[in-house]
Image: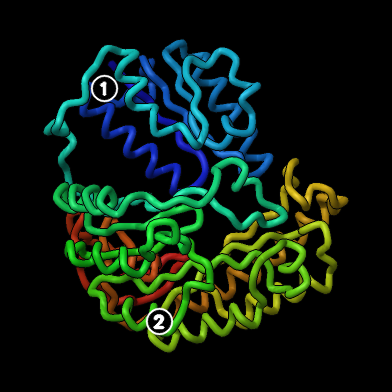
């Protein structure tokens, strides 16, 4: 039996799909090729913006047209259960963990203990979902309604999965969560303790997904700096460089506090990549507040900025406010992306002439700072080698 997976949205979704994929392959499914009809199609949806909704709808309709058994999971299901007509099985974010057992029962299959031999091959990076849900209720965000309250994955479950992934040959563990910084608050643990326990398993690398600036302290950074293989890549959620807009968004920090945390990081990790997300065109954002974000990006010197135009989501507090002209949001997005690109190029230029460790995936790979490096004669995928950077080509470093 052939299975096809369609995954939209965040890295948490990617990890959830990966775990379901492994379970189905153990049970005897094989991945459907692009030109093959699938007996089962799994669509893991996203609903963070109107564009995400549209992509989810299109993916569901394409799966239904194929004619096989269709399973739809995730945030789009949670918010749009009334639009699941013609879907064989749909599970919201609170219940998607049941998908494997229901599918196995539907197809009269059992879960074997081992992966088929064909699944063992050189690996590079793997996501580990350690946390789900969010209690922040930022005024623009639908995720707390789609994902539910903040909750941590059991530590023994994470460590067991990490051990299996390391045995399978994965070199880098990437910790993900909807609000990763909150890990352990409901179990009496902490993200810091979890990282140290994962480090004891001796992976080649440990990388963090998106975190909140509040978790950054001297103690956190001091202990992280002592972990072999900890990647100095900090994706610190920002959303705006304006104090007023951050208040309107119900974010719990100021630009000055965020900047202090960046300086703290660079004290322990001088070459650290600081990356972030910024929302452009929030309903109360004037040209003045937008320029504050532009100036903040220049001042911080981000290694990468993901720019998003504000997307109105019914059910959030910000949805009650009049939206800005779409053309204003489009122009501001383009200006901020151009500014962010300049800062990214400056950051990459700082590596020219230096030697860096590269985890190779194909003709190139990634440094601990998540910079892409390409070389003429790469080693096999999964190898980590030290290479000298000779120049920058666009947003790629040549080694």
Q: Nearer the viewer, residue 250 or 291?
A: 250
Please state which of the two labelled residues, at mark 1 or mark 2, is closer to the viewer. Answer: 1
Q: Residue at x 16, y 26 (%)?
A: 112
Q: Position of residue 86 (x, y in %)?
A: 56, 13
Residue identifier under label 2: 271
The reply to whether the C-beta atoms of the residues labelled 1 and 2 are less than 8 Å apart is: no
Q: Position of residue 16 (x, y in %)?
A: 39, 40
Which quadrant: the N terminus? top left
Q: Residue at x 54, y 24 (%)?
A: 60
Q: Residue at x 58, y 54 (%)?
A: 135
Q: With respect to residue 51, does 87 lie above or below? A: above
Q: Nearer the viewer, residue 142 or 207?
A: 142
Where residue 297 sits, quadrant-wise, is: bottom right
Q: With respect to residue 80, does 331 lie above or below? A: below
Instruction: Answer whether residue 362 is visible to the viewer in this image.
Output: no
- Residue 29 image label: 1
Label 1: which secondary element: loop
Total count of labels: 2
- Colour basis: rainbow
């Amino acid at each position: 039996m052939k299975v096809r997976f369609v995954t939209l949205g965040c890295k948490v979704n990617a990890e959830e799909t990966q775990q379901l994929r492994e379970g189905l392959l153990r049970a005897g499914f094989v991945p459907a090729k692009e030109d093959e009809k699938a007996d089962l199609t799994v669509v893991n949806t996203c609903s963070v913006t109107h564009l995400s909704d549209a992509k989810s709808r299109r993916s569901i309709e394409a799966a239904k047209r194929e004619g096989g058994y269709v399973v739809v999971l995730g945030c789009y299901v949670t918010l749009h259960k009334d639009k699941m007509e013609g879907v064989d099985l749909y599970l919201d974010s609170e219940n998607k963990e049941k998908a494997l057992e229901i599918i196995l029962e539907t197809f009269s299959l059992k879960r074997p203990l081992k992966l088929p031999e064909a699944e063992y091959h050189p690996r590079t990076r793997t996501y580990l979902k350690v946390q789900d849900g969010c209690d922040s209720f930022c005024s623009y965000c639908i995720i707390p309604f789609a994902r539910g309250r903040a909750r941590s994955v059991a530590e023994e479950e994470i460590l067991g999965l990490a051990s299996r992934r390391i045995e399978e040959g994965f070199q880098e563990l990437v910790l993900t969560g909807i609000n990763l910084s909150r890990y352990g608050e409901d179990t009496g643990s902490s993200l810091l303790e979890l990282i140290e326990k994962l480090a004891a398993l001796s992976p080649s690398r440990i990388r963090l997904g998106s975190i909140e600036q509040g978790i950054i302290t001297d103690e956190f950074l001091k202990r992280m700096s002592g972990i072999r293989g900890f990647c100095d890549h900090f994706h610190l959620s920002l959303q705006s460089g304006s104090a007023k807009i951050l208040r309107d968004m119900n974010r719990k920090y100021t630009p000055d506090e965020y900047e202090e945390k960046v300086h703290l990081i660079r004290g322990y990790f001088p070459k650290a990549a600081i990356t972030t997300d910024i929302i452009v065109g929030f309903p109360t954002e004037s040209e003045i507040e937008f320029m504050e974000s532009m100036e903040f990006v220049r001042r911080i010197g981000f290694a990468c900025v993901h720019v998003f135009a504000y997307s109105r989501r019914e059910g959030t507090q910000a949805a009650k406010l009049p939206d800005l002209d779409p053309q204003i949001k489009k122009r501001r997005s383009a200006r901020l992306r151009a500014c962010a690109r300049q800062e990214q190029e400056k950051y990459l230029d700082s590596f020219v002439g230096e030697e860096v460790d590269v985890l190779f995936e194909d003709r190139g790979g990634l440094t601990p700072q998540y910079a892409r490096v390409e070389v003429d004669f790469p080693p096999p995928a999964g190898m980590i080698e030290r290479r000298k950077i000779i120049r920058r080509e666009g947003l790629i470093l040549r080694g």
